Image (cartoon, coloured by chain):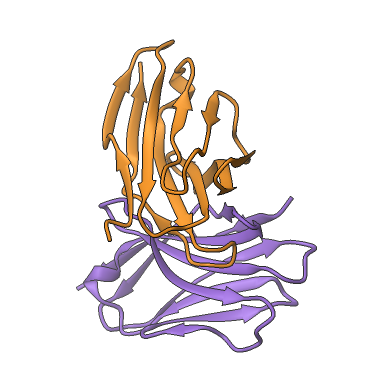
Amino acid sequence: AQTVTQSQPEMSVQEAETVTLSCTYDTSESDYYLFWYKQPPSRQMILVIRQEAYKQQNATENRFSVNFQKAAKSFSLKISDSQLGDAAMYFCAYRSAPEKLVFGKGTKLTVNP
Amino acid sequence: NAGVTQTPKFQVLKTGQSMTLQCAQDMNHEYMSWYRQDPGMGLRLIHYSVGAGITDQGEVPNGYNVSRSTTEDFPLRLLSAAPSQTSVYFCASSYSGQGSRYFGPGTRLTVT
């Protein structure tokens, strides 16, 4: 079974600085999708970024980018120019079948002014 | 578009009671799923559906039933509530298996 590991339960960053959240996963599949979701205190799950495993190019969405290392099964999220509104729980997720997402336990990000 | 809606937002049940959590989407998405989120955990898949009339079990299906009679609706039924089912429940939908998932706002359920 696929597993997703987020080794940093909590992280903090100064406003305007850059932070990287780590995620590793375990799979024997060659074609899959990876996601980062943000969950603010409102508890709404918000998709931040998506990566297709067959694409070598790392996905980017504005201030959010990923470092996808397929051989190492690593999928880290970099947040540049951190803003107070970035404070939230961040979840890494792996799509194991058409509608099966496997989530990590999350990283709580604090942004200090 | 209202997106994915869930009702109720909060619910308190006594052990042994039954109830249905409602989920609806107006985006004509084929794929819908239910997750639960417990403290310190990520979301775990309960049941999912890849189209009307088609459902399957996820990682933690015990104690829950689902059906999908229409594309829009995907209710989750708790047959006999137990304290272990105290959790926040999220419904999600997507156009395809590869697509981005849209989550509802969640239902916080407490079973006493």
Q: Nearer the viewer, residue B52 or B102?
A: B52
Residue A47 to residue B3: above or below:
below
Residue A113 appears in the rendering: yes
Residue A112 appears in the rendering: no
* Left or right: A98, with A30 as reference point: left
> So how many labels did they put on this image?
0
Q: Which chain is purple?
A: A
* Left or right: A26, with B105 as reference point: right
Q: Residue at x 67, y 76 (%)?
A: A53
Residue B17 to residue B21: above or below:
above
* Left or right: A12, with B56 as reference point: left
Q: Nearer the viewer, residue A90 or B60?
A: B60
Q: Residue at x 57, y 76 (%)?
A: A51
Q: Residue furthest top?
A: B16
* Left or right: A2, with B7 as reference point: right
Q: Residue at x 51, y 46 (%)?
A: B33
Shade of chain B as shown in the rendered figure: orange
Name which quarter of the figure residue B58 lies in: top right
Q: Could you tell me residue A106's position as x and y percent? A: 47, 56
Q: Could you tell me residue A26's position as x and y percent? A: 72, 61
Residue B95 to residue A15: above or below:
above
Q: Residue at x 57, y 66 (%)?
A: A23
Name which quarter of the figure residue B81 lies in: top left
Q: Could you tell me residue A110's position as x and y percent? A: 31, 64
Q: Could you tell me residue B85's position as x and y percent? A: 46, 26
